[in-house]
Amino acid sequence: VDRSEKMAIWIASLLMVSFSAALVYAFVGLNIRFPGCVTDKTPFTKGKVIQRGVGEYEVQLVAKMWAFEPSEIEIPVGSKVDLYLSSLDVNHGFQIKFTNVNLMAVPGTVNYAQVTFDKPGDYPLICHEYCGAGHQNMMGKIRVKAREDSLSGAVPQSDVGIEQAKTHEAPTLNESDLALLAAKGCTACHSLDGTRMVGPSLKGIFGGEEELEDGSKLTVNEDYIRESIKNPMAKIVKGYPKVMVAMPMTDQELEKLIEIVKGIR
Ligand code: CUA
């Protein structure tokens, strides 16, 4: 064994020892545990937001061509969210802007991230993995609401739906009606002035006829509106994505919403 070989053996051993020491130090000293990105949770097929406590949420997010489900999530500021992500079809990317959450949605597996939203505002959800023709349209939003911006509070200024309603359609709806529609997320996807958005416009919907996915037709009455709010997947209007989620609300709020929708002419 000549000198250079001895040297190489020493350096290699030193590197191995310092690498092992760094691992032990990270574990014991810095309290870093093994990455927990991939979970053993069973893959799910429906998107869900579950409130587990005050300011604590579990979000089960489904990625599919070409939407996230739920596509819009509203939580109060300061919320801690355990986020589980799965895919129904192909690999999708998943990034929450303004946070360090960046995952892949992989069919058959569930990935995990935890994030706390300390600042109010809109956090766009973006698919950053090319997943087919509609890839560039695949996005969503987490709306983190400031504390005052609750049911009885002021109308959120950033809400496009409300701005439209104010300029084109205000007469039949008062501020508290609009605030309720916004607080329950309705106006994020349903316009009040006939504009096509994610879901059917609410303008003149009551008493009209809708064609459903399966080709059947129905007349929009109170029961249909009630069902659509409580159980959005029960009947899907033809040509619209299955993305609506049931928002938590009291029976009074539900009946009030039905009254409001009836009045949107
Ligand atoms: Cu999903 Cu790109």
Image: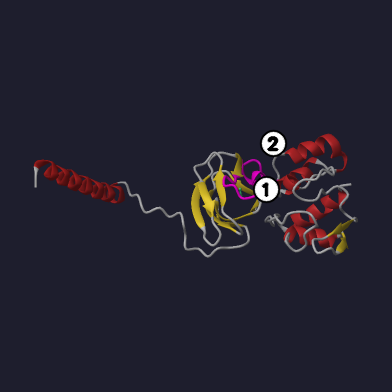
**Can the viewer see residue 81 in this picture?**
no
Q: Residue at x 22, y 45 (%)?
A: 15
Q: Which residue is mark 1?
A: 134
Decide if residue 127 is on the left or right side of residue 228. Answer: left
Q: Can you name the residue that lies furthest to the front here?
A: 2
Decide if residue 180 is on the left or right side of residue 55. Answer: right
Q: Is residue 236 above or below residue 188?
A: below
Q: Which residue is mark 2?
A: 158
Is the residue marked 2 within 8 Å of ligand 1, measured from its CB?
A: no
Query: Depth check: 75 or 113 in front?
Result: 113
Give residue 215's mark. none
Upstream in sequence: badge 2 or badge 1: 1
Q: Residues within 10 Å of mark 2 (few under 14, many from 20)?
A: few
Quadrant of residue 143 in the image? top right
Q: Amino acid at mark 1?
A: Gly
Q: Is residue 167 above or below residue 129?
A: above
Magenta residues, start to end: 126-151
Q: Amino acid at mark 2?
A: Ser
Residue 254 lies, in percent from the top left, at: 76, 56
Residue 195 lies, in percent from the top left, at: 82, 43
**Disc nearest the viewer among 2 and 1:** 1
Is the residue marked 1 within 8 Å of ligand 1, measured from its CB?
A: yes
